[in-house]
Amino acid sequence: MKPRSSLPPKERNARSKAAQLIHNKPLILGSLVEMANTCGKPNCKCTKGEKHKSWCVAIRHKGKRKMLHIPRGLEDSFFEGVRAYHELWEQMGIISEASLERMTSSRKGKE
């Protein structure tokens, strides 16, 4: 493989960002879902319509959708993990487009 310095700046930046995300951030492939529940206590505010709110992360595990409750103290970490995964996916798209462009342009030169 050629050195990274020979790559176009856009691809080089995307590869750098992707590497930083992989090494420095938690990555969570999932979606954040806000849940609103009632607790069942007869005098609680939730029985009057003001439900208790919490967050879950929806993931796929062994081909099935699964909802995992996010404890209150860990919400920021989960939000960061989901955001980091989406950012990584975006960088991978940039890298893929640049790779396809490079491969198809080199193929045209051989024809």
Image (spheres, rainbow, N blue to C red):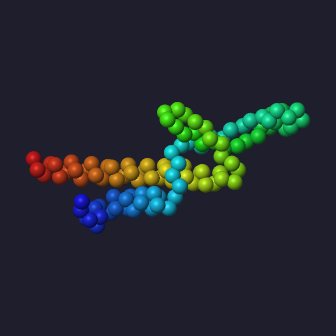
Q: Residue furthest front?
A: 62
Q: In which quadrant will I find the N terminus? A: bottom left
Q: Is residue 84 left or right of residue 3?
A: right
Residue shown at 43% from the left, 49% from the top: 89
**20 versus 97 height, above or below:** below
Q: Residue 96's x, y, as percent?
A: 33, 49
The quadrant holding residue 20 is bottom left
Q: Is residue 83 visible to the viewer in this orientation of the structure? A: no
The x and y percentages for residue 40 are: 82, 33
Name which quarter of the figure residue 34 lies in. top right
Total tally of numbered discs in the picture: 0
Point out residue 18 in the picture as x, y percentages from the top left corner: 42, 57
Q: Which residue is at the far bottom?
A: 5
**Residue 82 on image: x %, y %:** 54, 49
Tell me the quarter of the picture where residue 73 sits: bottom right
Q: Which one is nearer the viewer's eye here, 100 or 77?
A: 77
Say whether residue 25 is left or right of residue 45: left
Residue placed furthest toward the left: 111
Decide if residue 92 is in sight here.
Answer: yes
Q: Residue drawn at (60%, 42%), measured in percent from left and top?
A: 57
Q: Residue at x 62, y 41 (%)?
A: 68
